[in-house]
Amino acid sequence: MLNRIQKRLQQDCGLSPQQKTVVGVSGGADSLCLLDILVRLQFPVVVTHFNHLLRPEAREDAHTVELIATQYGVPFILGEGATPDYAQEHSLSIEAAARELRYRFIFEQAEKNNAQAVIVAHTADDQVETVLMHLLRGTGLDGLTGMLYRALPNSWSDNIPLVRPLLEIWRTEIVEYCTERSLTPRIDATNADTTYFRNRLRHDLIPELESYVPGFRNRLWQTANLLAADRISLEELTDRIWQDVHIGGGFGYEIFNLESFNLQSLALRRRLVRRAISHLRPGARDVGFALVQRALDFSDQPTATGQVDLGLGLCITKENEGLLIAAWEADLPNEDWPQINEPCPLKIPGEVDLGNGWVVRAEVLLDVEAARLLAHKNRDPYRAWIDLGERKSSLKIRSRRPGDCFHPLGMHGRSMKISDFMVNEKIPQRARASWPLISAGDEIAWIPGYRMGESFRLTPASRHVVKLALIQSGKKL
Amino acid sequence: MLNRIQKRLQQDCGLSPQQKTVVGVSGGADSLCLLDILVRLQFPVVVTHFNHLLRPEAREDAHTVELIATQYGVPFILGEGATPDYAQEHSLSIEAAARELRYRFIFEQAEKNNAQAVIVAHTADDQVETVLMHLLRGTGLDGLTGMLYRALPNSWSDNIPLVRPLLEIWRTEIVEYCTERSLTPRIDATNADTTYFRNRLRHDLIPELESYVPGFRNRLWQTANLLAADRISLEELTDRIWQDVHIGGGFGYEIFNLESFNLQSLALRRRLVRRAISHLRPGARDVGFALVQRALDFSDQPTATGQVDLGLGLCITKENEGLLIAAWEADLPNEDWPQINEPCPLKIPGEVDLGNGWVVRAEVLLDVEAARLLAHKNRDPYRAWIDLGERKSSLKIRSRRPGDCFHPLGMHGRSMKISDFMVNEKIPQRARASWPLISAGDEIAWIPGYRMGESFRLTPASRHVVKLALIQSGKKL
């Protein structure tokens, strides 16, 4: 067993026998066995024990572990915390609260001691219980692979791995080892308490499943082991695809290329969404199937627009070629859109600085013939040549108003709501409300970047031509 | 329900409502519901029923199904087979024998009727039972995904898909449907018989697991559904990697590029091996973890050589850059090696045809100075210039003999077993026994393609030089 565990420690847990590690020791058979082996293999360890203040005999457990550490000549650190209070404050089960407090303490000690890792004594039996628990409660591939030999990042640290070298050792082997080495484990009475879900699995369900198929434990362990490799392959594939599909991100948002995203297989799309969510909500434990499915449904329905709530305070939206998953409160990326807040007049000739580097300029062109030629040849949507005709009113720059209509050039004079036009033209939703419009009286003369109004186009009869331009500073004028 | 099933039939099962399908109808609720829906959706069907000759009332079941088909105005085909006999003959359980006979019959009918598919009425409950059964007995990702909406190829056909449109419909919904539509299912008493493993799961275990976590059934179904997408992604990835790694194959063998194979992730290596085995042993049901692991252990240990038994009558071996998985009895690819079966003399000058396009030629070179220069510059392992010295014996071409030794050039006269030399030089194992050696008396003068003997090298004192060449016809002489 010593050799097997040494292999796991170095190959699978990635530990160096020269560097310090922090080991969690409850005093039970599993952790005593682990500690004994670490000492025999001469791994430098710091022993930690956490008293959850749940049982009267807990103080004695702590004392025993301290004594053992002293006998081995290794440092011992004791922590304690009022688990029931913590559970109540955070609406957690006693099990969850105990776990949270215990791990937080161990990782704090690992940080302080500059340890290479936290080692815990989970066994093959724990693995089977964990996988079965996930399976009963509903899970995907990741839950079915159970615990890992080396988990980094984990729920408690981004830089200190949580390692589990005993994952292939069965409890019966541990008990045997303790007997051989004359180790005397403390008995934790709560381990027999079948009001705890895990204990019901351990004491009732797993033995029963063994009666259905002898060797069930081993088979489920093997299944988890097989799936772990599949999971790694899919994660590697996701890494690769993420590089292609993820086109941006910032504080509180992630952006995929919508088209590339929708080209991926269902499994990969799910993983991409989960990964984005794990960046936005690290440690979130309830990223359910339905949440991910909402994101997928939104992404591949061409008619789905706006911002859709995903849960966990996140939303999903489309913008140009992008699919954004974002926190509702996030400052989404500033796309350098031209925006106008307060309406203002545009003199002819003259220019208005919109801020954010954008300027609208109006010029008078006297050579109507040349203007028509330029307008005809123009491919730049940020330039327009308009004929104000008999209109006396001057030009104004303003944002859209409820009910605003527009006769887009080329639509035979048909009228269209500005809001519909903006949706059709895929103006990013966030940019629409303050997108600058050039109006003359009640009419919209030009929507910079998109279209001018039909009734403003130049004709052979045009006499007064105004050249309009929306210019981004730094770009050629 | 009608709409949901229509969607599954067309989208997931890939059926055309214009083409004929063959449906398996036992007379139970599931298959009556399925048939009723197919008829209502105007899918052209042929009803088949198989009498397993297991229960006295089976004849009545058949009669009932025939009557129903007649009422719907659709064709009916009856099959029957002595299940207990078949089970005994093939050492199968009654369940497995019944299944084998039934499906074989249905697919025969599908073939005869030129049907686009075989449809069966497996429900969401069947799916959960199947996944749980696989889980208890030990499985990997593929077993956990359970049954597919559309399986092609399947165990019974390479060109007719087996489709299951009811996989998301629960038994309670089926029963409700039958009541609404006044369908009267036949009761199969064996469904209540808990000596059958599946029935124990259905009647005892699953309700118990529901008591652990209410909604367990739905969760497990969802898990299988999630895993199905992961499986598809991994299969697609395997398809792609197979193209790169699989470098050949033939009747009874598959060849991977050893180096590329070993570069793949564990999950992919497992899948590549499984795929090779599924080509060599189609329909094999007992490709266990251990078999696949034997192949992986052999492939990534540089010291592993020879032919290793994998089980299922297959072996694995390495040859040059290739990793071969082959049936023991397979005629492995002819690599066009030079081979000699009967020893024969090699005159000087003279040549010997080894067959298979190979010729050994000996020439006398009089200009010793020129010969030494040529020998020095030579990079072609199929040429050698040797000095026979005082040896009077003529040259011979023969294969190796037990105990044969050799003083390879450049090893300071050290002696080496020919067999070790061949292993070191990675001469393909199958080629070693008949690889041609050129001997002079008891000494090996040259191993064509590899090395000449130290004591045959040219020196300034050399007087008699023989040029040896192994020539493959078609190659330049």
Image (tube, coloured by chain):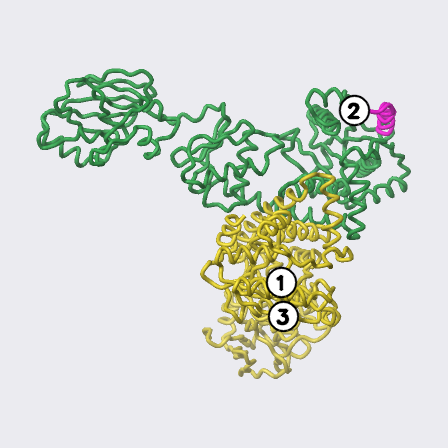
Chain colours: A green, B yellow
List the residue tagged with mark 2: A52
**Vertical relation: B124 (above or below) A374:** below
Q: Position of residue B270 (x, y in %)?
A: 63, 54
Near-viewer residue (A476 or A27): A27
Q: Nearer the viewer, residue B394 or A280?
A: A280
Q: Which label belongs to residue B79?
A: 3
Q: How many marks?
A: 3
User: Which chain letter matches label 2?
Assistant: A
Residue A151's quadrant in the figure? Answer: top right
Placement of A342 over or under A113, stated as above or below:
above
* Amino acid at dot 1: Ile
Q: Which residue is mark 1?
A: B277
The answer to which quarter of the image holds residue B311 is: bottom right
* Magenta extent: A50-69
Chain of the residue displaying label 3: B
Q: Is residue B100 magenta?
A: no
